[in-house]
Image (spheres, helix red, strand yellow):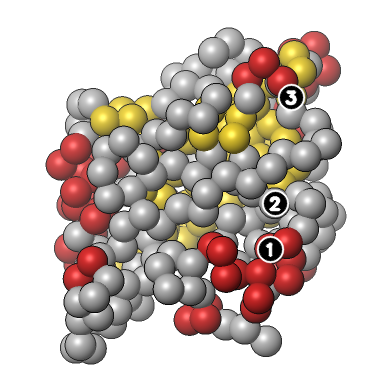
């Protein structure tokens, strides 16, 4: 079976993933371009059970550099996501991570009417109502739920700054640091709950088609300096020779391009 080191965003980039991860060729793949005029207003049914979440700050446990992004691993106990397209099922937060580009004009995985953002934050949850483990849920059509937040360049984001200050300690692949200064994931979400939702997949291999996507319509602002700190991460372990032919080994452009929505339903709820 193909492993994590068999793919990246350069030589073994998204165009090649299907060779080793057959699910990447499926009809329910993510990300997609959100065509706003195609979205079906479903405010009534989606707001019958409003989207609700709870994230204790102590749930954020470790900051990790897996070689293709920064990721915060969580203790899901006490976390909660339910309502909206998830109905009554209870999902717990497993981890959250980010995607970005080499410049401030691109970096998001999803686009809106063809427009990219500087980055995209993903909060990954699993369905604890129906499944016993994250691994089991990741193989099920309704196993995972991801909240997506677009990043736009602007003022410094205070909660994101906590992460940015820690990133030099995980500058190389496989480095991990415990989180001491609590990070509140709810403070990384926009102040407007309007969203688009559709059924899709993980955007990294093995690209399991197990995700209910909830993409917030409103972005959050991060600074150019904060994004540059993200771009200073390295995708090779400390002590290894730098693969200088690939942007000096920097983690940049770590996003999968949009794929066809096809005949999938795109619903929206709330304001834009």
Q: Mark 3 points at which residue?
A: 267
- 215 lies above or below 236: above
Left or right: where does residue 159 sit relative to residue 208? left
N-terminal-most mark, 3 or 1 = 1
Residue at 58% across / 19% down in the picture?
A: 194
Q: Where is residue 195 in the image (x, y as percent from the top left)?
A: 61, 24
Q: Position of residue 143 (x, y in %)?
A: 76, 54
The answer to whether one can see residue 249 in this image is no
Q: Which numbered disc, 3 or 1, marks the residue closer to the eye?
A: 1
> Residue 94, labelled with which disc?
none
Picture quarter with the N terminus: bottom right
Q: Name the residue under label 1.
A: 24
Cα–Cα gap, marks 3 and 2 = 16 Å
Cα–Cα gap, marks 3 and 1 = 23 Å
Cα–Cα gap, marks 1 and 2 = 7 Å
Q: Looking at the picture, tell me which residue is in the foreground, 56 or 109.
A: 109
Picture quarter with the C terminus: top right
> Residue 29, labelled with which disc?
2
Q: Position of residue 48 (x, y in %)?
A: 80, 17
- 183 lies above or below 140: above
Mark 3 surroundings: few (<14), some (14-19) or many (≥20) residues within 10 A:
many
N-terminal-most mark, 3 or 2 = 2
Residue at 57% across / 82% down in the picture?
A: 3
Residue at 38% across / 60% down in the picture?
A: 69
Secondary structure under tag 1 reads helix
- 19 lies above or below 240: above
The answer to whether one can see residue 182 in this image is yes
Secondary structure under tag 3 reads strand
Q: Looking at the picture, tell me which residue is in the foreground, 82 or 77.
A: 82
């Amino acid at each position: 079976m193909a492993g994590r080191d068999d793919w990246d965003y350069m030589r073994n980039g998204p165009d090649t993933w299907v060779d080793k991860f057959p699910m990447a060729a499926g009809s329910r793949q993510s990300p997609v371009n959100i065509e706003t005029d195609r979205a079906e207003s479903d405010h009534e049914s989606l707001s019958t059970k409003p989207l609700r979440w709870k994230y204790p700050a102590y749930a954020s446990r470790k900051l990790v550099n897996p070689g293709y992004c920064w990721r915060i691993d969580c203790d899901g106990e006490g976390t909660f996501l339910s309502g909206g397209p998830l109905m009554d099922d209870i999902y717990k937060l497993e981890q959250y991570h980010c995607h970005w580009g080499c410049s401030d004009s691109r970096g998001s995985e999803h686009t809106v009417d063809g427009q990219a953002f500087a980055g995209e934050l993903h909060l990954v949850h699993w369905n604890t109502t129906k499944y016993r483990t994250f691994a089991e849920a990741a193989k099920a059509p309704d196993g995972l739920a991801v909240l997506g937040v677009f990043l736009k360049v602007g003022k410094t984001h205070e909660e994101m700054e906590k992460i940015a200050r820690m990133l030099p300690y995980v500058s190389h692949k496989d480095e991990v640091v415990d989180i001491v200064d609590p990070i509140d994931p709810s403070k990384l979400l926009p102040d407007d709950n309007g969203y688009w939702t559709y059924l899709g997949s993980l955007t990294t291999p093995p690209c399991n088609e197990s995700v209910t996507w909830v993409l917030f319509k409103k972005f959050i602002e991060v600074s150019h300096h904060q994004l540059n700190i993200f771009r200073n991460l390295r995708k090779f372990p400390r002590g290894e020779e730098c693969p200088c032919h690939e942007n000096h080994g920097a983690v940049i452009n770590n996003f999968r391009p949009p794929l066809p929505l096809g005949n999938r339903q795109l619903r929206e709820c709330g304001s834009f």
